[in-house]
Image (tube, grey):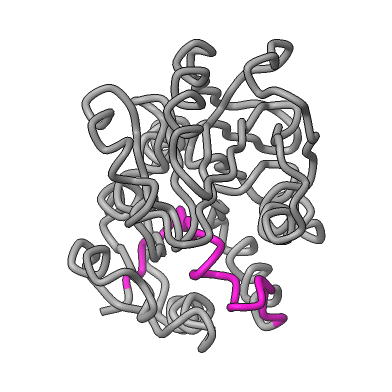
Amino acid sequence: MIPTNIRLIATDMDGTLLNSNHEVNESFYPVFQQLKERGIQFVAASGRQYFNLEKTLSDIKDDVIFVSENGSYVVFRDEELHVQALPKEAVFEFIRIARQIPDNYLVICGKKKAYVESDAKEFLSHLTLYFERYEVVDDLLEIQDDEFLKFTICNLKGSEKHAYPHFKHLHADYQVKVSGPIWLDISHKLANKGVAMAFLQERLGIDKAETMVFGDYFNDVEMLQQAGHSYAMENAHPDVKKLARYTAESNDNNGVVKVLQKLLLAPQSV
């Protein structure tokens, strides 16, 4: 059933709004303009870096709220609305653990830029999809002059099997999320897309019943739970599908846009 009272829409990016080539379908933009004309606020919520999100949606960046780094950093029109950083010593401990695991590439996701120790092409080809600003350094443990929004591990053999088991014991104190097939993210306990959405709902005076969200992976779970109208993509992780109220067509079939088109065709509530 398509609702008629939606005032806030949030979507994950990779595997959700973006296709498998990490591209926005051109049909999204006229839909976005119609949503804007109706006064519906649009949120791009992602594990991606803020600067990367801003570039990806550069044509509409002034009208999009960016929830980046899995909810750790929320920005609208270059104004910081919400920051939830990690203690540096905690991140340094994560690095020490991760260095004991074979085939891991480590990323400190700072507010200014991301920091990595490897310039391996196979790693950077993935990193640059999600991070616009980054620096290759000799030792991540030496980074001090930045706020740490998130710690990320890239394991090309598979994050759920090869990285997550070494960090799952941290769930009580931190957000530990398998955010994609090769990515594991660790954030502050109070940093997730759901917390960010709750912050925005309170700030904008919008409740869950007026909120629609789309996602595909574990870092979207809390966001899906924060909306009365939650959609998992057809390509979503099976466990994530169980938690959403509805299913949208896959990201490669333009599932988000198709739902939004139906929303725009539905009679508006008075």
Quick one: 128 or 14, which is closer to the camera? Answer: 128
Identity of the residue drawn at 20% across and 61% down:
243
Q: Position of residue 96 (x, y in %)?
A: 48, 23
Q: Residue furthest left?
A: 242
Q: Quadrant of residue 209?
A: bottom left
Q: Give the camera-side residue of 19 and 268.
A: 19
- The x and y percentages for residue 206 are 38, 43
| 189 w.r.t. 131: above or below | above
Counting labels gives: 0
> Residue placed at 50% from the left, 32% from the top?
99
Q: Tell me: residue 117, above or below residue 213.
A: above
* Left or right relative to 22: residue 208: left
Q: Residue at x 34, y 38 (%)?
A: 176
Report the quarter where the C terminus lies: bottom left
* Residue lying at 44% horizontally and 40% vertically, measured from the top left: 101
| Region of the chain picked out in magenta, as a range | 3-26
Choose between 163 and 239: the one closer to the eye.
Answer: 163
Q: Is residue 173 magenta?
A: no
Q: Residue 20: image x %, image y %?
A: 59, 78
- The image quadrant that residue 51 belongs to is top right
Q: Nearer the viewer, residue 172 or 256?
A: 172
Q: Residue 171, how many percent across, how many down?
A: 25, 32
Q: To which quarter of the image does residue 1 belong?
A: bottom left
Most frequent secondary structure within the magenta stretch: loop
Answer left or right for 7 relative to 176: right
